[in-house]
Image (spheres, helix red, strand yellow):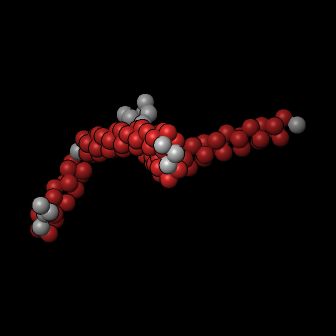
Amino acid sequence: MPLSEHEQRLLDQIEQALYAEDPKFASAVRSARSRSRTRRSILLCIFGVLIGLGLVLVGLLTNIIVLSVVGFVLVVGACGWAGQSLRSHPSGSSEGMPPIGRSARQAGLRTRMEDRLRRRFDES
């Protein structure tokens, strides 16, 4: 049963208060949710690949080309979905550490490269 507008507003206010009071706990809850969603989607992808391979084999054994094509499409789709899930929710060993954005890493690399270039020109 969906929440009423009043209940949804109250829930949103409670969530905002929780994020304001304890951001560490809120981020832990958020990461636990994303991990369970990733696991669930990976399991669905594995089942999709297995069912797809089964359809391909049955289609080949019974000479029903359409069944084999559907199985192949299912395998490719499940693999693509798994790749998308893993790419959008990376899990790593740096869970407790703050995330480093791509621009921060690139800025650090850019700074190091500029420093090396300056040293080379200063030496000559």
Q: Which residue is at 26% across, 42% downward? A: 29
Residue 16: x %, y % from top left: 22, 56
Q: Is residue 12 above or below residue 85?
A: below
Q: Which residue is at 77% across, 37% downward? A: 119
Relative placement, left or right, of 28 versus 99 is left
Residue at the front extreme of this rendering = 62
Q: Nearer the viewer, residue 87 or 100?
A: 87
**Number of numbered discs:** 0
Position of the C terminus, as image quadrant, is: top right
Q: Is residue 68 above or below residue 4?
A: above
Q: Which residue is at 74% across, 37% downward? A: 116
Q: Nearer the viewer, residue 76 or 69?
A: 69
Residue 35: x %, y % from top left: 33, 40
Q: Nearer the viewer, residue 6 or 67?
A: 67
Relative placement, left or right, of 29 versus 79 is left
Q: Is residue 85 visible?
A: yes
Residue 50: x %, y % from top left: 42, 38
Q: In terms of image quadrants, where is residue 99?
A: top left
Q: Which residue is at 20% across, 54% downward? A: 15
Residue at the bottom extreme of this rendering = 5
Q: Is residue 99 visible?
A: no
